[in-house]
Amino acid sequence: MASDAQRPEPEAGIRAEEPSALSSEPVDLSDIRWSDGLVLFVFWLLSFVVFLQFFTRYVLNNSLGWTEEVARFLLIGVTFIGSVMAARKESHIAVELFYRYLSRRGRYVAQLTVDVISLVFFATMGWFCAELATKTQQMMVSIDVPKSWIYWGVTACFAFMALYALLALVRHLRTGTSRLIDPERFALTGTGL
């Protein structure tokens, strides 16, 4: 057994990891809504179907034919229901770099422009999906369900995204601010992360 004097010194800069100061902070779940639960349910359903496909194909060596197609459509559901959640939280991907170099008035105009473009895009895509759903008469290959149901689901998601984009536009017009217009006002303080 080595004495304390014989123990090597730890290398400079290497030390035991200290617990995070944020680990004792409560988690803020105030922005969770019913649609978040829906996307979580569809995600776990997708996980189950993919696991079932893996198990039947590689363990039982006799795969179920319907799992691949159902998994594909569940992935579409996760994507678009998740997009509704992102539209509600105003967290769709965006290039925020240019906002730093604009005046406050320029950021306000840019925010309203982005809001209008998003609203038009979501409404237009919803319209196109509805058109596609009405013209699709084909059934799914492996299960006896019309493919138009998938398109109607995507149409509903685009309608919700358009609604949330409209609500964001109205809120930005009414309050005159957003996290991109006044980033210092919405900056994280380090609490409640």
Image (spheres, grey):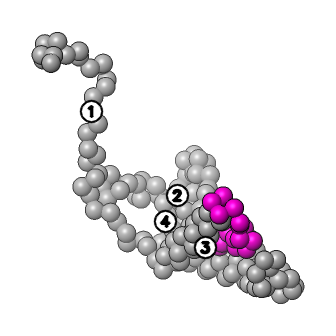
Badge 2 is on which residue? 180
Position above or below: 108 against 154 = above
Q: Nearer the viewer, mark 3 or mark 4?
A: 3
CB-based contact (under 8 Å), mark 4 and mark 1: no
Q: Secondary structure at mark 4?
A: loop
Q: Secondary structure at mark 2?
A: loop
Quadrant of the drawing holding the C terminus: bottom left
Across and down, in percent, residue 60 comes to: 65, 63
Badge 4 is on which residue? 177
Which residue type does callout 2 highlight? Leu
Measured Cα–Cα span from mark 3 to mark 4: 27 Å
CB-based contact (under 8 Å), mark 2 and mark 3: no
CB-based contact (under 8 Å), mark 3 and mark 1: no
Badge 3 is on which residue? 81
Sort mark 2 into few (<14), some (14-19) or many (20+) by Cα contacts within 10 Å.
some
Q: Earlier in the sequence, mark 1 or mark 2?
A: 1
Main secondary structure of the magenta stretch: helix
| Magenta-tinted stretch | 58-80
**Point 28% across, 53% down: residue:** 23
Badge 1 is on which residue? 16
Query: Is residue 59 in the magenta section?
Result: yes
Position above or below: 150 against 13 = below
Which residue type does callout 4 highlight? Thr
CB-based contact (under 8 Å), mark 2 and mark 4: no
Q: Earlier in the sequence, mark 3 or mark 4?
A: 3
